[in-house]
Image: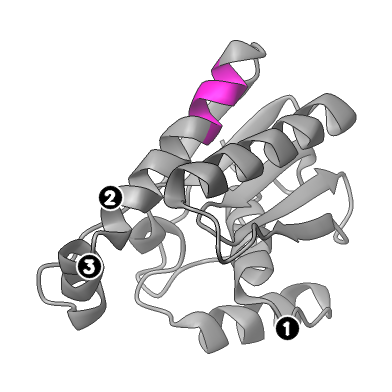
């Protein structure tokens, strides 16, 4: 199914220790934010803090669907290899799992999408530019821009480099 309108009552999320989110209310201007824990906190404390803040968003906005970016490992990417060897990939997986669990515990539908599926090989600056071209809004925070891009892709308005869409008929 291809959507022609902007998502409505949908929360799109770029998980991480700076979790970007965009809540779509049916127009091209989502309500956005980023959840950033104290840098001095342990990984577990950061996950707890972000989880608490995310739960507040779920209660406040009551989305009908949450779309969370999944993790993807590219064996040919230095960024992916560094992420795995540093343990960051594992922590990102924990974070996404915690957010998914919160959605399930509140009976909210949740879907995941791989970055390669929605943005192809675009880097942060390319995603920001594409989002700006589509909705004429510039987001300085790359995590927010990614969350907005995920929502736009869900609506069929953000086509990745390979031209595939998230929802197809």
Q: Are marks 3 and 2 in contact (CB under 8 Å)?
A: no
Q: Secondary structure at mark 3?
A: helix
The residue identified by callout 2 is 90
Counting residues from the N terminus, which is met first, the one under dot 2 or under dot 1?
A: 2
Q: Secondary structure at mark 2?
A: helix
Residue 75 pos. (x, y %)? 10, 68
- Residue shown at the point (45%, 69%) measured from the top left: 160
Q: Is residue 77 left or right of residue 166?
A: left
The residue identified by callout 1 is 140
Residue 62 pos. (x, y %)? 82, 25
Counting residues from the N terminus, which is met first, the one under dot 3 or under dot 1?
A: 3
Q: Is residue 87 left or right of residue 107?
A: left
Q: Quadrant of the N terminus?
A: top right
Characterize the magenta stretch by its predominant secondary structure.
Answer: helix
- Residue shown at the point (56%, 78%) measured from the top left: 127
- Give how far apart the Cα atoms at labels 2 and 1 are: 27 Å
Q: Nearer the viewer, residue 56 or 109?
A: 56
């Amino acid at each position: 199914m291809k959507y022609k309108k902007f998502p409505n009552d949908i929360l799109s999320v770029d998980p991480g220790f700076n979790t970007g989110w965009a809540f779509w209310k049916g127009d091209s201007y989502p309500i956005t934010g980023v959840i950033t824990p104290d840098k001095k906190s342990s990984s577990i404390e950061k996950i707890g803090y972000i989880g608490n803040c995310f739960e507040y968003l779920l209660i406040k906005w009551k989305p009908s669907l949450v779309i969370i970016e999944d993790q993807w490992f590219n064996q040919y990417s230095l960024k992916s290899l560094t992420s795995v060897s540093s343990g960051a990939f594992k922590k990102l997986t924990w974070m996404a799992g915690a957010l998914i669990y919160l959605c399930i515990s509140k009976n909210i539908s949740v879907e995941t999408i791989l970055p390669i599926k929605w943005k192809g090989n675009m880097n942060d600056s390319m995603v920001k530019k594409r989002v700006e071209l589509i909705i004429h809004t510039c987001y300085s925070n790359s995590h927010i821009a990614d969350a907005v891009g995920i929502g736009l892709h869900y609506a069929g308005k953000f086509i990745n480099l390979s031209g595939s869409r998230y929802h197809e008929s």
